[in-house]
Structure formats: C-alpha cells, structure tokens
Image (cartoon, rainbow, N blue to C red):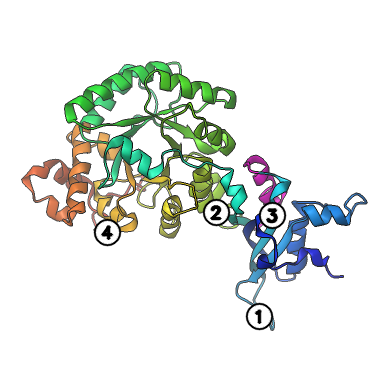
C-alpha cells in the first residue's frame, strides 16, 4: 500500500487519553508527497527509521507508532498546482503515544521536536495533552491569585523593575538601589538575568542586604515588595541555591528558564520547601521561536511550556522596545499565560524590553489588570530618579484604572513625576514616542 493505514487516523477516532497531539507548520517543494512526508515524521519520532526493521513488529507499531491525524495544505490545492508555485505549505498534526515518553519535558521534546527539527522548514506550533498527562503537572504554585494575595493588591496591574546596570553592582549597591525603587511604589523588583552568583555580588550576601533594604522601604511606604533573586546555576545547584536564598530571607526567586531547562524549573516549582513565587526569565527564547520556518512557536516557548513547568510569572518581550516581535505574537503569548487551562493556574505575564509609563494604557487595553508592567530604564532612568520613576508608574496606573487618559493625568499637579516621564518618553500611539530601536 501507499502507506501503512495505521498511520492515517481521525483525531476523534483515537482514544484521546493515549495520545499527545503535536501541530506543525511544514513547507516543502511542489513535488512533495504530503501523506508520505507526514508518515515519515510520525515514524521517525516513534518506532522506525528509513527502512522497516525485523523487530518493528505489528504489535510494537500498534502500541508505539505515531499517527497522522491531519494534513491541511494552505492554500488548499485540490485540482492543480499553479505554474508559479515552487513551494507548498501545510499544517500537519501527529498524535504520539504519551506512554512513549511520559509526563516530562526532556523526552517529550525529544519525541515531538527531536530529529525532525533538522528537516528544514518545519515548526512546532502547538501541543495538546490528554487529561491524565496534564494532571501529572502541578503548574504554578501561586500564579496570578497567589501573587496578588502576597502583595495585597487586587485591583490594578502590578509594576516591576529590573536592577540596572545589569551586572557590576555589589550587594550594598544593589540594596541601595532596591530601596529607592521599592519606595517609589514598585511591587516586584528583579535581579537582572546576568547577575546570579558572581564573586563581586554573591547570592546570599545580596539576599541579606536587599531584603533588609526592602523591609525598610515597605515599612516606610506601607506596602509589600517582592524581590526575585536569580538562582540560575548548574542543575545540581539550583535547589540548594533556592533553599539557601529563602533561608536568608528571599520572598521570591527567578530562573533563566531555557538555559537551565524546563524539567529543572518544574523540579523547583513543585518542591514543597520552595514556598515563594518563581519568575521565568526570557533568555534564549528567541533562538527557539524567531525563525518563521523552523523551531517552536513563541506561544509555546514563552507561555504554554513555562506555565506547565510551574512558573508563576514570566517576562514577555514586547513589540514596544528593543526586541523584534510581532504584535500578534505578543498578544497570543499574553493570553496563553492567562487563559483557563484545567487545574493549571494562570501565569502572570510581565511585558518588558523597553516599556515605559507611556505604555500603561496600551497594556491595560490589551490584557486588563492581570499583568505586571516591567520597566528597567523607565524607573531607574527617570530624570527625577528611581523613586520618581516608580511613582510615575503608579500615578499612571491609578489614572488609567479610573478611566482617565495618561495625557489627562499629566495635567494633575499631583502627578509631576508622571508628566516628566511622558514628556521624556511619550505615549504609545503618539508620534513622539521614544524609539528604543534607534541607535543614534
């Protein structure tokens, strides 16, 4: 036969609890035989190789073979191919027996985007899980609701600041800056991803100095501040770093997700002794999703997979600043962080990468209140200083939540910090918005 009929199945004809279904974008030349190509994907990542081997029995294939459950050509040529068509484009869906790899990331990825990641124009777009498989993952321990409960803030977006300069400060300098940032009303402060446990700023020394400063600022402002300490390290040191940081007073943690791996993140998130929220940082994500032809979709890389691993909040690169990402991709990532997903709690998105006070209205209009607006230079680089930078964000958020535009809010004499920020960097959508992509 053209292909083994076992390959070709309807998705709703399968026992759904047995399969993880992966959806791919595929492109190939006009002569490609789509059914054979899809069958080759399915067998390559399950039972077979390029030739049938004796040990690949019918029993083995029945239990372990991948099934093709969808081939959709776009445009959908059914009569003929136009003469100018040199390349054909498809959405292909393959169902993989979940018992082949079990509820983990390492072998899941080896199966659904392993060797086939080297097959040219092929990109993993989405993954669907059976109920039993999803239940094996605990998901975020805190999520949106838990973070709000810790801070006692329920009715507005949160504000984040990342310590700048990215690296080079010692614990005392970091603490001094964190105090000013917290005093301005910032809810969550994060280590920069480039600072973890360097000799000039050891993790535990930094935790002790910063948390003392945060306590003083919180007592003065009458609010609580979380500080996410970067515990990124070799895999075998991650848990120790987390527990030592918590023991030294840390009230939140951060990990560079893709450099350490999702199973390592899951290990931290599901550990009952690690009882503080964990922030996912976006390092290395672009290497996985930026190609339009290959890799893994931005929604999976930046939202669905980290959320499944149990991260409570995640830096999401925005189209407003220095990193290229489409508005459509950005919006889909944000919603993938928040949309209901069985027992998996929402992961709070933290749009950043060039966000200023002039983006508050835009972000609230896109996602509502359940976001963390992340700003480095927008707080620390405020012309009136870091305290004013934090105040400017809070003034802008308070106004927008009352239905007052940022431009109107700048007319209030009590919002002088906001006015300076808007005069300096502009409002998103206006012609004079500060352009972070400019090199001169």
**Among the two numbered marks 3 and 4 on one chain, the one whose residue lies closer to the N terminus:** 3
Residue drawn 28% across the image and 31% down it: 225
Secondary structure beneath disc 1? Answer: loop
Image disc number at residue 18:
3
Q: Is residue 14 above or below residue 235?
A: below
- Between 348 and 16, the one lying in front of the other is 16
Local packing at callout 1 (Cα closer than 10 Å; few below 14, some 14-19, many 20+) is few
Q: Can residue 360 be seen in this view?
A: yes
Which residue is labeled 4 in the image?
A: 429
Looking at the rendered image, the disc whose residue lies closer to the viewer, 3 or 1, is 3
Counting from the top left corner in percent of width and height, residue 101 is at 70, 44
Image disc number at residue 297:
2
Residue 405 image-quadrant placement: bottom left
Residue drawn 43% across the image and 42% down it: 314
Residue 367 image-quadrant placement: bottom left
Secondary structure beneath disc 3? Answer: helix
- Stretch in magenta: 103-121
**Among the two numbered marks 3 and 1 on one chain, the one whose residue lies closer to the N terminus:** 3
Report how far apart the C-alphas of labels 1 and 2 lie in the structure: 29 Å
Report how far apart the C-alphas of labels 2 and 3 lie in the structure: 24 Å
Report how far apart the C-alphas of labels 3 and 4 lie in the structure: 48 Å
**Among the two numbered marks 2 and 4 on one chain, the one whose residue lies closer to the N terminus:** 2
Quadrant where the image shows the C terminus: top left
Pointer 1 with pointer 4, Cβ within 8 A: no
Report how far apart the C-alphas of labels 2 and 4 lie in the structure: 28 Å
Pointer 2 with pointer 3, Cβ within 8 A: no
């Amino acid at each position: 036969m053209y292909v083994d009929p076992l390959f070709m199945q309807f998705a709703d004809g399968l026992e759904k609890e047995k399969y993880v279904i992966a959806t791919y974008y595929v492109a190939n030349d006009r002569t490609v035989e789509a059914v054979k190509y899809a069958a080759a994907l399915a067998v390559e990542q399950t039972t077979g190789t390029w030739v049938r081997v004796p040990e690949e029995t019918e029993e083995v294939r029945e239990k372990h073979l991948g099934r093709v459950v969808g081939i959709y050509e776009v445009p959908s040529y059914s009569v003929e191919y136009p003469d100018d068509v040199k390349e054909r484009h498809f959405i292909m869906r393959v169902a993989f027996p979940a018992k082949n790899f079990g509820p983990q990331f390492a072998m899941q990825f080896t199966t659904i985007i392993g060797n086939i990641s080297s097959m040219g124009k092929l990109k993993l777009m989405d993954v669907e899980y059976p109920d039993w498989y999803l239940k094996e993952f605990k998901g975020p321990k805190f999520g949106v609701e838990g973070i709000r409960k810790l801070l006692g803030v329920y009715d507005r977006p949160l504000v984040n600041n990342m310590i700048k300069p990215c690296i080079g400060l010692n614990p005392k300098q970091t603490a001094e800056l964190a105090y000013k940032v917290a005093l301005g009303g910032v809810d969550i402060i994060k280590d920069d991803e480039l600072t973890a446990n360097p000799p000039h700023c050891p993790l535990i020394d930094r935790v002790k100095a910063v948390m003392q400063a945060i306590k003083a600022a919180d007592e003065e402002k009458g609010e609580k501040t979380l500080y996410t300490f970067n515990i990124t390290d070799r895999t075998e040191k991650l848990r120790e770093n987390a527990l030592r940081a918590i023991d030294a007073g840390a009230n939140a943690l951060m990990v560079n997700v893709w450099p350490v791996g999702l199973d390592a993140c899951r290990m931290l998130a599901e550990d009952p002794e690690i009882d503080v929220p964990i922030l996912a940082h976006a390092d290395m994500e672009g290497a996985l999703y930026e190609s339009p032809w290959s890799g893994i979709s931005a929604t999976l890389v930046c939202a669905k997979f980290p959320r499944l691993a149990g991260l409570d909040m995640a830096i999401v690169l925005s189209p407003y600043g220095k990193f290229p990402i489409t508005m459509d991709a950005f919006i889909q990532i944000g919603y993938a962080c928040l949309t209901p997903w069985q027992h998996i709690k929402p992961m709070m998105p933290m749009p950043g990468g060039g966000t200023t006070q002039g983006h508050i209205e835009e972000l609230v209009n896109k996602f509502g209140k359940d976001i963390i607006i992340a700003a480095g230079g927008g707080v620390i680089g405020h012309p009136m200083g870091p305290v004013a930078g934090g105040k400017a964000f809070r003034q802008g958020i308070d106004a927008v939540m009352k239905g007052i535009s940022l431009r109107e809010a700048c007319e209030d004499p009590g919002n002088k910090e906001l006015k300076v920020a808007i005069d300096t960097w502009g409002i998103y959508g206006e012609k004079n918005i500060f352009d972070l992509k400019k090199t001169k």
